[in-house]
Amino acid sequence: MNWIVFALLTVATWGVYGVMLHTGQSQMLPPGGGVVDPDEARYKSFLFVGLAYFLVAVLAPLFLLMLKGKAFTGYTTVGMTWSLVAGVVGAIGAFGVLLAFGAGGKPYVVMSIVFAGAPIVNVLYSLYNHPPKDGWAAIKPQFLLGIFLAAAGGYLVTYFRPDKPAPKPSPAASAPAKPKA
């Protein structure tokens, strides 16, 4: 069950990722104060996300591979290509999160959509690449219900978000009641 510990580590870190990314972007102020171009703040924040990826995803595994004497041997062209494409896709997704914040999205809404939608995309892409060995009839209704519930959860969290303004009462509902004669 070690995998579940690592999966929960990812849940915890990615769960705070959006809020921390938004905070970093919003705090990217020029020296001495003043007004900062929102695009400039996003790009600067993303630059430091890239630096963090370099530190954690380049230097750390390189060090661990060097300890095993495997840092510069055993790479395959196909493995390197797919890994690079995966990294590009992940980086585009992280940049999309920043752009969503820049367009007015709040972290708890943006990340709710991302984290409700990503598993749905993942399962559809995975099924496309690796269809069930027993055929499509092997897909159980509970599986489809899970996909529906993930989508519904993302919708509910987004639609009923805490900062959504309450509907204004109609003029008839807010008028004082007339006394009966």
Image: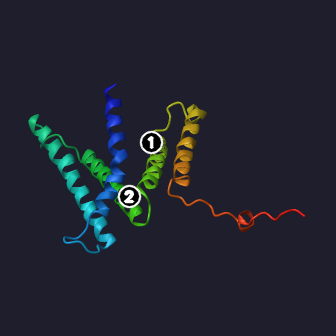
| Quadrant assignment for the N terminus | top left
Q: Which sits in the foreground, 18 or 2?
A: 18
Going 49% across and 38% down the picture, which residue do you hit? 131
* Disc 2 element: helix
Residue 32 locus on image (x, y percent):
19, 72
* Disc 1 element: helix
Going 32% across and 56% down the picture, which residue do you hit? 21
Q: Which residue is mark 2?
A: 97
Location of residue 142 (image quadrant): top right
Location of residue 89 (image quadrant): bottom left
Residue 128 locus on image (x, y percent):
48, 44
Q: Which sits in the foreground, 68 or 33?
A: 33
Q: Which residue is mark 1?
A: 126
Residue type at mark 2?
Answer: Val
Going 19% across and 52% down the picture, which residue do you hit? 54
Residue type at mark 1?
Answer: Ser
Location of residue 13 (image quadrant): top left
- Position of residue 64 in the picture relative to residue 121 (left or right): left
